[in-house]
Structures are given as structure tokens and as C-alpha cells.
Image (tube, rainbow, N blue to C red):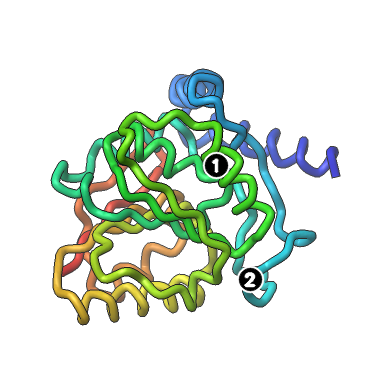
Amino acid sequence: MIAMKLIQYIYYFFRSIWFRGPINTFKLLTFERKYEKQLGLNTHSIVNLDKLTLAGISSSENHHYQGASYYILFKVFNLLPNHLKSKPLIDYGCGKGRALFVAEQCGFTKLIGVDIAKELIENAITNKSIYSKKNKASTFSFLFEDATTYSIPTDVEVFYFFNPFGESILQLVINNIKASLEKNPRTIYCVYLNPKFKEVFDANGFNVFTTIKSWRYIEGIIYEIN
């Protein structure tokens, strides 16, 4: 188990060097060390789902947990329009909650994490009990639920994905987002990091708001639709 995780870390390190270059990789590592300690969190790990308690059916399309880079998270949440910061934000596949804690640091105040793995939600709740909020009025909800059946609150305007699942599950979630949009017309933004299945967003009428790149690597895409 330890050897497998070590191999995964080595793989992601050299992959980052290849796609992002050494300077960007160094920035990612620096932010990783700084903010995990500064925010008092325990989110730095890779967790496979094979031995966890799942809210839905086990599938190879449910990807392992890995927290997105602090460096990229701060960048992407600060690229979103300021008026969204008072609106609810959902993180699909929230894992241990890292992205939502960074979003709160960036000014977002209504934060919802949805994850299929019970143990990861428990980790997120533990991190929540340790985390010192930037805004005392900020709220966090971590939900042990299957993303495909989760009922979206009609006032959510930001959705965050760090490649949490494969193409067919992503399509089901996007169907739910579009159904929510029909119930309450509004402009919706979707942050998609490590966008392996970006064609799903393209095929469903989402427009590119902005793209985040590091050298030859597309870190993520922010989509919008109304």
C-alpha cells in the first residue's frame, strides 16, 4: 500500500515536471508546504476508493482522491467574478475539503462539499473543526452522497470539479445542473480542473469563460452557461 502511494507521488512529480516545467512545479510544491501548514489542514494525500464506504455503486469512473494544488486553487477562485462570492459553491468529489477551504480564503462564504466516500467526508468534517475561517459568517456543509442523485439547491451558481469521475458520470451530473438551471434561470459557472472530459461541457452548451495554463499543461477551464 505504501509502495503504491510512493509510486503515485513519483509519477505525479515527474508528470508535473514534464507538463508544467520545473519553475511551475516548484511553485506548486512551495504552496503545498506553506498552506497545508498555514491553514492547519490535513488534505495532502492520495486516497484510492477501493476500501472506502461508498454512497453509490463502486465504479472505475469514480476517481481517487487527490487535493488540487493550492497554487492553482488560489489562482482559479480569484479568477471568478466577485459577485459570486456570496453565492453557494458546490465541490463535487470534495474529498477532505481542501478546495472549499481555499475558496473560503478567497472570499466565498457558502460552501458545500459532496463526496461518495464516507471516510473522506469524515476527514473533511475533522478539517472543518480545525480550520479558522476568514469570514466568521462562512458556512460549510460536507455531504456523504452520490453526485448523480444529489439534489442541487436552486441558488447555487458555482460548481467545482477536480476530475472526480469519468465521462458518463460527469454527463449525469451536468444533466442535474442543467435541470437546476431550468428551474431557476441564472448564469452558472463550472470550474473544471484537470479537464480530461472537457468535450462533455462543450457538447452541453457551456461556453469557455477562461482557461488556466501552466506551460504546456491546461490546469483547468472555467465554463459558464445561462
Residue 47 seen in this snapshot: yes
Residue receiving disc 1: 67
Q: Residue at x 74, y 60 (%)?
A: 52
Q: How many C-alpha atoms fall within 10 Å of the one at disc 1: few (<14), some, or many (≥20)?
A: many
| Distance of label 1 from label 2 (alpha carbons) | 20 Å
State the mark number for residue 200. Answer: none
Residue 130 drawn above or below residue 150: above
Secondary structure at badge 2 equals loop
Residue 18, located in which quarter of the rendered image? top right
Residue 212, located in which quarter of the rendered image? top left
Residue 177 drawn above or below residue 31: below
Secondary structure at badge 1 equals loop
| Front residue of 140 and 214 | 140
**Residue 6 in picture, x, y percent from top left:** 77, 35
Q: Residue at x 55, y 68 (%)?
A: 145
Mark before the other along the chain sequence, 1 or 2: 2
Residue 56 drawn above or below residue 103: below
State the mark number for residue 55. Answer: 2
**Residue 61 in picture, x, y percent from top left:** 60, 69
**Residue 157 in picture, x, y percent from top left:** 24, 60
Closer to the camera: disc 1 or disc 2?
2
Q: Residue at x 34, y 29 (%)?
A: 134
Left or right: 182, with 152 as reference point: left
